[in-house]
Amino acid sequence: MPESDRRQQVHFRFIAGIPFSTHAELLTLFGRWPKKDVYKILWITTKEQSSLFYIANPFCFVHGWVVLAESSSPARYGTGTMALRPTPFVTSTRLAALFATTVMSATGAVAATKAAVHKNKLPVHETKPKKLAPQIQQDPEEIKVSADRPLAGGLMKRQHAPEATNSISALAIQQRGAASSPLQIAASLPGVNFGSSDAYGLSVRNNISVRGLDSTEMGWAIEGAPGVDQAYYWPYTETWADNENISDITLIAGTSRINDPVQTASGGEMIETVRDPSRKRGAYVDYSYGSFRGQRVFGRVDSGEIGHSGIRLFASYSRTAADNFTGPGRNTRDHVDFKAIKEWSDRAKSSLFISYSNWDNARLAPYTLSSWEKANKARDNFSQYTYAGNYTPGVTSNYWKSYVYKRTNVLLSWQNEITLTDKVRLHVVPYFHWSLVDSPGQTSIQSNSFYYGNEKVDPGLSSATTPAMIHSNQTEFATGVNAYIQYDPTRHNHLIAGYWYDHWNIEQSGGLTPLDANGNSPNATGKYVLRSPSGNIYGGTHYQESSQVNEFYVSDTQGFLNDKIKATIGLKTMMYYLSGTNQIPGGPYHFSSAFVQPMPRLSLSWQINKALQVYINGTTNTRAPVPISTYPTTYSVSTGKVSQAGNTNAKPEYSIGEEIGLRYYGAVHFDMALFNMNLTNHQLVALTYLNGAPVQQAISAGGETIRGITAELATKPFHGFSPYINGQYLHTTIDNNLAVNGDLLPTAGKTMVASPKFMANIGVNYTHGPFFANIAFKWVDSQYSTFMNDQSMQAYKTVDLGLGYRLPRFSVFSRPTLRLNLSNLTNVSYLSSIASIQTNSKATKGIYGTTIAASTPSYYLAAPFSAMVTIGSEF
């Protein structure tokens, strides 16, 4: 595991500090320094400026570690944050004053100093500590990324926030397959329902839901910035950061943090944190090879602190490639991560994160239930219903090259934290997000029936029927800033007040490019599309949209009984405005929509003792309608009829949720939450086709009630084994009948789609010396794919296995590691998720007597057994 991934950050206190300039003496005294870690320390100085440290944390003593600071000029008295190096414990008469407490009180520090002086006869410049400046209190909703030790091999972490919160640490992330996507890693979190069509994070054919709410109903944040694609509200986390650079993935189910810049969090929030650059110069490289000609290479360089500038940075590059497990096509992803940190002083810090991705995905065709059953029985690796691998002019209507999804993505986040006074801290996070996307498909141009919007035109082609690639080109960018102040008027009161502004813009066009005799398009990205004599792009879609979000938020936390009880009340108000233009004939040229939504919340937590916490909360959240699937008007190029009628009256989704939770961290670690949620204007997205191109459509599902319980359990390591289990029971009901074609389907009381009643994860992590292993079992119950509950996706069970060995150091390889990851170990054939939700799969009589025709849901295939070997090392 890369060294910096284990670094923790805690506050330290200097008792009698001096400028730290004796690294050589310390190396001589304590020997070679291995990994970095952090613990609280007490330090004493001599006239010769040799430094001596006494551990104020008995956990270190148990492991036999002496802790050394790594700083060039620490303050004589004060507090701050520092990365430290543990080193094997050395018996010495100088190490005489070990504390039995984990808290460095002023009196304890003085006592230890006197004891050390008496034992070692060291002169002390000053033994009475000055009064330290009061510290800014921790945000009660803050997710501690690295302050607490991970449990169950990193699959569970100790939580403090008064809402259902679950995290995966770097320890578990680094043991997963090197090419796994963040969502594949997050699939082991409680209540996460995730399915994907490949094992290497290269497919867009995946879906995730939490408590029955899909990814478009969740907030997504990385490094303090919104990570979601605002066109469809899909996260595309594969473009954020490489696994080797991720230090934490946290899920908040059912709500979001009040100070995070998210506009889609009616169902929860997923937060990804990127590792900090190492304070030591170094490098890390790994290479992976696996099933389906899967290959991946990753390399990272850490600068260490550059001189005494307070600047350190890392840059990394990776390339991942693999064939589809069935059918034609190869998928690739090139990715770059960069992060730089500047510590201006102990009161100010800036962090700049930039990522770049270039991703090509040869998509797999979705399957209906009947086609999957037939293909599964045929045992031919599902080759019957995939996209065609060869092209025959005039015959092939689904050539695979016409369905290659392309995405280029740039994400930038610049986090700034400034301590203005002892009671006030300012956070400012500007960000930028840019994407260039094409989601194409295949269609045919009929020269005698070809439309531009609702106008019939002559495409200017020589053939009566011409096969063509239909594009869905999108260029979008988002800029914004999130700024808030933390203010502590008293020791027991914590106030947050902030403002978030976001501006987003998209240009979309659905042009067509004729295919040649070999099935190739003149330009795969839609550069040479058909145009009118005046230069307009022929097609069924062409529009521009832009939105603005202005959000104000405030939260106040009051502690009682020495902060054992904390009560928090908060309010955020979103002001949302979207406008756009349809740039093809037929629809209204200009459209706009706006709303203002206040979202109050409150919580109460009681820390009964060090091990036991209970909490209760009530929260509200909102999610704006999906811009690209709601507001523009689109047309069929073959008939000129409206395919999607723009709806500027669509209302935002709104959720009201309550939770009661209990946490216990003792002999076992247990976290449980009971939840209830009510949604109004519930909106889902589903796969559909527009002129042959796969796109997402918005579905309005009315009201919904969600109730259930989520729990996770882990034990302390026993002879190297660390068991872990989580599970969820979910009960959802549709609250009203669904409007379809002027009638109502009798859906009230039915179970909501994509909401399995039971889910469970069982895992065991094992570590013994240099060897480590993990095994994970996942069970997902069946889930309905229609609102009438007349078709469902089958339940499934999978097993994943990981094995690893830390090789001894040799030559320049300081920490070589060999890993083997096996996915879907039993090679189960199953459907991973629902692609296209439908109202009813059987003809059904509506409330008013109309027979509502059947429609067929579709599904995504799950990846079969795959194996990947990874060899990597630090340098």
Image (cartoon, helix red, strand yellow):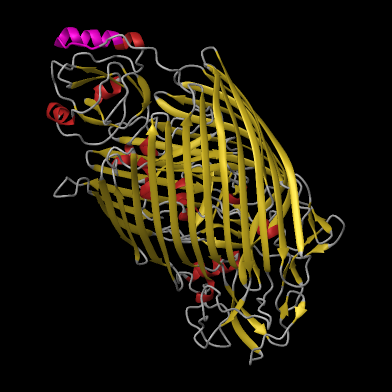
Front residue of 507/250: it is 507
Residue 233 visible? The answer is yes
Residue 569 in picture, x, y percent from top left: 64, 26
Residue found at x 38% / y 64%: 321
Q: Nearer the viewer, residue 505 or 604?
A: 505
Q: Is residue 336 left or right of residue 230?
A: left
**351 vs 195: above or below:** above
User: Is residue 187 visible in the rendered structure shown here?
Assistant: no
- How far across and down, in percent of the image, does residue 845 sit? 81, 59
Pick the residue in front: 584 or 23: 23
Q: Is residue 806 left or right of residue 384?
A: left
Q: Is residue 607 above or below residue 174?
A: above
Does the magenta portion include 117? yes
- Residue at the image position 25 percent from the left and 11 percent from the top: 113
Q: Residue at x 52, y 32 (%)?
A: 426
Residue projecting furthest to the right:
848
Q: Main secondary structure of the magenta part?
A: helix
Whether residue 803 sits left or right of residue 353 in the image: it is left
Q: Is residue 115 above or below residue 194?
A: above
Q: Position of residue 862 (x, y in %)?
A: 49, 60
**Residue 229 in the image, given as x and y percentages of width and height:** 57, 54
Judge from the rendering whether residue 288 lies leftward or rightward of residue 350; answer left or right: left
Q: Is residue 766 magenta?
A: no
Decide which of 291, 442 is in the foreground and name it. Answer: 442
Q: Which residues are magenta?
A: 110-125
Q: How many marks?
A: 0
**In the rendered image, which quarter contains the N terminus?**
top left
